[in-house]
Amino acid sequence: MSNSPHWLVMAQYSTASLTRSMEIISRYFAQLTAEQEKQMHTLLTLYPQWNAKINVISRKDIDNLEVNHILHSLAIAKFMQFVPGTQVLDLGTGGGFPAIPLAVLFPDTHFHLVDRIGKKLRVAEDVAQQAGLANVTIQHGDIREVKGAFDFVVSRAVMPLPDIVPLVRRLIAKAQHNALPNGLVCLKGGDLTDELKPFANKVMVEEIAQYFKEPFFETKRIVYLPL
């Protein structure tokens, strides 16, 4: 049995855990710069600290932050690449997912985070500030209060597609800059048959398991709807 003080054991475990988490992220995103690696490290450090105070992430999920939340968010980056100057709205961002991990990967894309729960937005704002993400803005309120034009709206398990589309359609910019037409990009799981029926001729569904090999992604999908 180790004779190390309790605090030292915890510090050693934390360092090992952070190293393992960064290795998992780097496995799929080997092109990260030194600055981006530092920012990812900040996310991996701050979210567990905040979660001990505010239940931003499910207690059972916080130990799998790098897979269930960061990689899950970054699946969008495997599906499409935002060109510099792209404007993205994150609807129902909570503590900053998927926008904050994406903001690390796309420093020349602006991410506007919106949620009605102020305490979760405080977490997102603090993480963004401490990670030095100058491409992130925060808005506390309802989606109906948002003004502006965005190339894409992203969301993660916020509400069914038929409910989201009427709320965000007016916010989609007319001018096109990216390889894919402007529209809605959602991270979803489970049976989507009924939810997608109204959009059967336009919607695109991609299996996230083709990008990441962890079992968590076996039922996870990217749903893209041009608007």
Image (cartoon, rainbow, N blue to C red):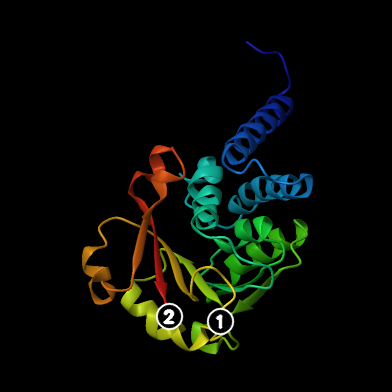
Q: Name the residue located 45 percent from the left edge and 67 percent from the top edge.
A: 185
The C terminus: image quadrant: bottom left
Query: Circles 1 and 2: CB distance less than 8 Å?
Result: no
Residue type for callout 2: Leu
Q: Residues within 10 Å of mark 1 (few under 14, many from 20)?
A: some
Mark seen at residue 141 = 1
143 over 42 or under it: above or below: below
Give the image quarter of residue 37.
top right
Residue type for callout 1: Gly
Q: CA distance from mark 1 to mark 2?
A: 23 Å
70 over 133 or under it: above or below: above
Give the image quarter of residue 176.
bottom right
Q: Nearer the viewer, residue 203 or 47?
A: 203
Q: Measured from the top left, where is residue 195 in percent x and y?
A: 26, 69
Q: Residue furthest front?
A: 179
Q: Residue furthest top?
A: 1
Q: Measured from the top left, where is residue 60 in percent x and y?
A: 45, 44
Q: Measured from the top left, where is residue 164 in percent x and y?
A: 39, 78
Q: Secondary structure at mark 1?
A: loop
Q: Measured from the top left, where is residue 77 in percent x and y?
A: 55, 56
Mark seen at residue 3 = none
Relative side of 135 to 150, left or right: right
Q: Name the residue located 60 percent from the left edge and 50 percent from the top edge.
A: 52
Q: Mark 2 highlights which residue?
A: 227
The N terminus: image quadrant: top right
Q: Name the residue located 78 percent from the left edge and 49 percent from the top edge.
A: 35
Q: Secondary structure at mark 2?
A: loop
